[in-house]
């Protein structure tokens, strides 16, 4: 352990976002350019400093309407960037800054900008509010070949049996889990860029329509339009950067089965990535001041709370019940921007990473967690899984 | 029975035997010729001993619902909702868990631990899809 870890040779230097909303009337390319330009300026850099580009996902991953947008080469051309390193991937993604950190740590680039642009809000509207996996493909391939033909047509249907089994095994209730979306909505109310900001109560949650049991409307994140860009820089460039943030530790682990319904034990997703991450740092779960845990669905925040060791396996329901522990002034403020459940599905932990950086800089405005020095960021789990700790520069 | 709307599967070297057997109303999984372990979905290699010679074994008899969901959202035009999807395991067949529709009882009566019979129903693209039947 120590400064020989490659992630210690990288910093996150900038974050930027386009307009975010249920519907933003700009092309994916324009949203991307807005976010990239904002992130580079936020880093205290200029486009001439950028020599690496990465995006998620790369080409050929358009399996959901509005999911994949644009092309790395179009952005390279539009901005006239000469790049010595590029990446457009799903496999090996782990975290937004995972590949870029390796690139700058190994000298392949000095400043990499990585972005994720979604137009799923517009796509949902165009599809009558019901975009389905595979809608753009005539056949279902890979793990989806076992799911789309039988009617597991959306990620929510695919993760729902995991949630049902988890709740059955550990006696966790919807009344307990409601506190995750309810508390995150309270955080979103303090975030002017969040998609949904009006108050949400436990009663609202319990009265909401079911999508795929036990998951109701408020257990699902919000399809949105928007772009997030993150600049990752070589640590040696820190003196030239406006407000860098350290990467204390990061890990990406794919283990188990490639789809949620095949997991042998429906309480262990994310544990491998979290264990690998904690092995790279002397910090412990109790040192974390603010947690940005992936929440494509409520159950994903649940498994990350447990995988990261913030509570024991099967204990997340009791941990979040009442909302005090995960509130802004609680022991573990959770998804302080509203998360994807209220802030919008900016996806792949790009929104989570941007918020962690802002919290560690003290730039989170009305939702600032006082004295935030250590932030946890996690991504997905069950397929790609990533876990990291970011820390304040000084 | 009208075909269930959905997205048909891509058929590969590994998955072809499953879908062919499904058309005959039979549930087949891969079994390792070396160690006898069964695995699903088929990968053309044993997930236990990594043996490359796989044969196809038919699973007969009843299964148990490991988990489930009842989908209420009309994801595609013509999709009848609600419907139950069950994940089914089979006594004596570790390593095998198959997802399918559930029929034979109202969706809201689907429960973890319930017993089901193996079955299939007409699915998208002319494929027969797993459709378990609640045991009386």
Image: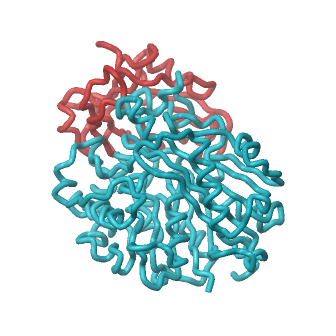
Chain colours: A cyan, B red
- In this rendering, position of residue A200 left or right of residue A61: left
Q: Can the viewer see residue A216 in this picture?
A: yes
The quadrant where residue A295 appears: bottom left
Comparing A91 with A21, the one in front is: A21
Instruction: Please report the residue visible at 69 percent of the width from the left and 58 percent of the height from the top.
Output: A113
- In this rendering, position of residue B19 left or right of residue A217: right
Measured from the top left, where is residue A277 in percent x and y? 59, 71
Q: In which quadrant will I find the C terminus of chain B?
A: top left
Instruction: Please report the residue visible at 22 percent of the width from the left and 43 percent of the height from the top.
Output: A209
Instruction: Please report the residue visible at 60 percent of the width from the left and 59 percent of the height from the top.
Output: A95
Measured from the top left, where is residue B54 in percent x and y? 62, 32
Comparing A85 with B69, the one in front is: A85
Instruction: Please report the residue visible at 31 percent of the width from the left and 20 percent of the height from the top.
Output: B78
How many marks on residues?
A: 0
The quadrant where residue B123 appears: top left
Measured from the top left, where is residue A389 in percent x and y? 56, 73
Measured from the top left, where is residue A154 in percent x and y? 41, 37
- In this rendering, position of residue A216 left or right of residue A220: left
The quadrant where residue A94 appears: bottom right
Give the vertical position of B77 relative to A294 (above or below). above
Give the vertical position of A243 relative to A167 (above or below). below
Q: Can the viewer see residue B36 in this picture?
A: no
Comparing A39 with B35, the one in front is: A39
Give the vertical position of A143 relative to A83 (above or below). above
Q: In which quadrant will I find the N terminus of chain B?
A: top left
């Amino acid at each position: 352990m120590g400064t020989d870890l490659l992630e210690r040779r990288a910093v996150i230097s900038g974050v930027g976002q386009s307009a975010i909303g249920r519907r933003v009337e700009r092309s994916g390319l324009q949203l991307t350019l807005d976010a990239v330009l904002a992130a580079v300026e936020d880093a205290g850099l200029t486009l001439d400093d950028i020599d690496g580009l990465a995006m998620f996902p790369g080409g050929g991953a358009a399996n959901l309407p509005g999911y994949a947008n644009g092309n790395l080469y179009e952005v390279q051309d539009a901005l006239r960037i000469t790049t010595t390193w590029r990446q457009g991937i799903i496999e090996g993604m782990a975290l937004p800054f995972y590949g870029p950190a390796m690139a700058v740590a190994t000298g392949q680039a000095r400043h990499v900008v990585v972005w994720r642009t979604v137009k799923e809000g517009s796509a949902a509207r165009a599809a009558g509010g019901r975009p389905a996996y595979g809608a753009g493909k005539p056949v279902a391939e890979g793990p989806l070949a076992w799911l789309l033909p039988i009617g597991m047509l959306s990620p929510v249907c695919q993760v729902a049996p995991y949630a049902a089994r988890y709740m059955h095994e550990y006696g966790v209730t919807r009344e307990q889990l409601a506190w995750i979306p309810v508390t995150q909505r309270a955080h979103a109310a303090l975030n002017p860029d969040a998609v949904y900001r009006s108050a949400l109560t436990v009663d609202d949650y319990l009265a909401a329509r079911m999508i795929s049991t036990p998951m109701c409307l408020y257990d699902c994140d919000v399809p949105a339009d928007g772009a997030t860009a993150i600049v990752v820089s070589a640590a040696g460039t820190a003196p030239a950067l406006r407000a860098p943030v350290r990467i204390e530790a990061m890990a990406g682990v794919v283990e188990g089965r490639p789809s949620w319904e095949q997991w042998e034990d429906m309480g262990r997703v994310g544990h491998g990535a979290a264990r690998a991450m904690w092995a790279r740092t002397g910090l412990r779960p109790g040192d974390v001041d603010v947690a940005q845990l992936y929440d494509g669905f409520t159950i994903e925040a649940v498994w990350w709370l447990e995988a990261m060791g913030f509570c024991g396996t099967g204990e997340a329901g009791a941990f979040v019940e009442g909302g005090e522990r995960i509130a802004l002034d609680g022991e573990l403020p959770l998804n302080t921007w509203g998360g994807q459940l209220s802030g919008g599905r900016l996806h792949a932990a790009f929104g989570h990473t941007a918020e962690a950086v802002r919290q560690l800089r003290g730039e989170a405005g009305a939702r600032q967690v006082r004295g935030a020095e250590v932030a946890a960021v996690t991504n997905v789990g069950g397929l790609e899984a990533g876990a990291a700790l970011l820390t304040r520069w000084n | 029975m009208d075909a269930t709307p959905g997205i048909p599967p891509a058929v590969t070297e590994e998955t072809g035997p499953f879908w062919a057997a499904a058309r005959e109303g039979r549930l087949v999984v891969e079994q390792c010729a070396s160690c006898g372990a069964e695995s699903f979905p088929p990968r053309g290699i044993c997930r236990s001993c990594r043996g490359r010679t796989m044969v196809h074994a038919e699973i007969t008899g009843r299964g148990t619902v490991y988990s489930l969901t009842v989908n209420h959202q009309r994801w595609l035009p013509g999709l009848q909702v609600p419907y139950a999807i069950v994940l089914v395991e089979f006594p004596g067949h570790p390593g095998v868990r198959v997802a399918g529709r559930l029929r034979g009882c109202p969706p809201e009566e689907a429960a973890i631990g319930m017993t089901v019979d193996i079955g299939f129903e007409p699915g998208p693209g002319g494929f027969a899809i797993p459709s378990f039947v609640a045991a009386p």
